[in-house]
Amino acid sequence: MSFFKRIFGGGSFDDDVAEGDRHFAAAELEDARIAYERALERKKGASPEAIARCEERVAACLDGMAERRIAEAERLRDEGHLDLAETELRNAMDTASSPELVKRARRMLEVLEREDARQKAEVPDEISDDDRWALLAGSWGPDQMDEYDAYGEPFRDALLALHDGRVKEARATLEALLEGDEEDACFLWLEVARARILDEDYAAAEPALRELLERVDAEDSADVVLSAYAELAGLRDRQNDEEGAIAELSAAMQAIPDDPRPFFIMGRYLRSKGHADEAADVLEAAVPLLSEDRPDTAFLEELGLAKLEAGEDEDAAAYLDRVLAQYVQLRRLDFPPGTAVARAKLYEKAGKLEKAADLYRGLANGSDRANHLVYYREAARVLLELELEEEARRMLTRALALAEDDPEARAAIEAQLTELE
C-alpha cells in the first residue's frame, strides 16, 4: 500500500489483510494488529472465512504481544525489579485476547504481589551501637552532654545496655557513677531514675526525679524538666492516680509555660483517659505557641484525633489536613499512621471513598510495617465498595502474603479472593 493510501484511508480489505500478513510474518505484531483491525473496518463484501481469519489474526497479535510482556516481566522479576514487572503483567492482562493467557498473567502477578508485600513488610536490620548512641546524644543539651562525657565509656555502655533491655546491669553501673559523683551530679539523676523505673523500683525512682528537678534550670533544660515531669506522671498513673498524674503534667506546663510540649503530653494523657473534650481544649490553647512556618505535626495530629473523638469532625479534618499538607510540601508521602487512618475514616464517613482508599494504599507501602496487613485489608474493603474489583484483588493478594501466621485472617482473605474469582 502506498504512503498516501495509508495516510488518507485508501486501500481495501484485501490490501490491509496483505499488509497485516507481511507484518505478522516479520513478527511486527503491533503493526500487524493495526492493519488487520483496519481491514475489519472495511470488511463489507469480504467472505465470512476471510473475516474470521482476520479476527483470529488480531487475537493472535494481541496474545503474542501479551506473551512478550510476560517474558519481559519474568526478566524484570529475575533482576529484582518487582514494580516494573508488575506493570508489564498488568499490561499483558489488558492486552491478551485469550482468557487462559489473562489467567496466566494474573497468577504470575499474584505471586509478585505477595513477594513485594513480604519485602515491604520486612523489618530493617537493627542499627549499630554508634548510630544508637548518636540518636541518644542528639537530644541532649550542651550542659547535659558535658556531664555525660565526663562519665566516659562506663556511662555509654550503661545507657546502651539500658536500651538493650539489660536493665539490672545498666542500673548497677549508673548507680555506681552516681555514688561517686552524687554531690555534683545533675542530669545523671534522670538516667538513674529511668533505670529504676525499668527495674520496677518505682519507690526509688521518684526521689531521683525530685532531686533532678531541684538541681536543673528549667529555662536552660526544658527537655529534661519535661522528661522528669512526664516520668512522675507515669508513676502516678501506675498507681491509678489520675488526678496526681494530671497535677504533675500541670506542674510541667507551669515550669515551661511558653513550650507547647507539656500541653501536648497533657492532651494525649487526657485523651487516653477518655476526656477528649478536655484534651482538645488543652491542645487548642497551645496552638499559638507552635511555629508558624512549620508547626509540630505530632501536635497537630494529636489535636485532630482529640477533635475527632470529641465529635468535631470538621475541626478534626482541618487539623489532620494540615499534617498531610506539611508532609506533601516536604515531599514526604509516608504519612503518619494516626493521621492517615483518622483522615481515611473521615473521608469514608463523608462518602469520599476514593480518597480513603488512596490513604490506606499509601499506608500499606509506608514504614508502619507491623500494620501492613490491616492497611491492605482496609484498602480492599473500600475498593470493593467502589466496585474496583481488580485493584481490590491486588490488595487482598498482598494481604494474603502477610497473613501466614494469622489463620483467621488468612481464611477470610482466601474467601474474599475466591468470591472475586
Image: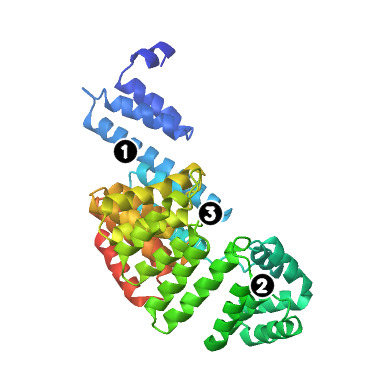
Q: For marks 3 and 1, give the one nearer the viewer.
A: 3
Number of other residues with Cα within 10 Å of mark 3, as a class: few under 14, some 14 to 19, many 20 or more: some
Nearer the observer, 371 or 237: 237
Q: Which mark is residue 77?
A: 3
Nearer the observer, 136 or 147: 147
Number of other residues with Cα within 10 Å of mark 2, as a class: few under 14, some 14 to 19, many 20 or more: many
Give the vertical position of 269 relative to 203 (above or below): above
Q: CA distance from mark 3 to mark 2?
A: 54 Å
Q: For marks 1 and 2, give the one nearer the viewer.
A: 2
At label 3, the amino acid type is Arg
Determine the secondary structure under disc 3: helix
Give the vertical position of 53 relative to 277 (above or below): above
- Residue at the image point whose x is 25% and y is 50% from the top: 386
Number of other residues with Cα within 10 Å of mark 1, as a class: few under 14, some 14 to 19, many 20 or more: some
Determine the secondary structure under disc 2: loop
- Residue at the image point whose x is 62% and y is 84% from the top: 167
- Residue 403 appears at what percent x and percent y? 40, 70
Query: Is residue 207 in view from this perspective?
Result: yes
Report the quarter where the N terminus lies: top left
Q: Which residue is mark 2?
A: 187
Quadrant in the picture for residue 184: bottom right
At label 1, the amino acid type is Glu
Q: Residue furthest top?
A: 4
Quadrant in the picture for residue 279: bottom left
Q: Viewed as shown, does residue 213 lie left or right of 419?
A: right
- Residue at the image point whose x is 42% and y is 66% from the top: 266
Report the quarter where the C terminus lies: bottom left
- Residue 271 appears at what percent x and percent y? 35, 67
- Residue at the image point whose x is 44% and y is 68% from the top: 250
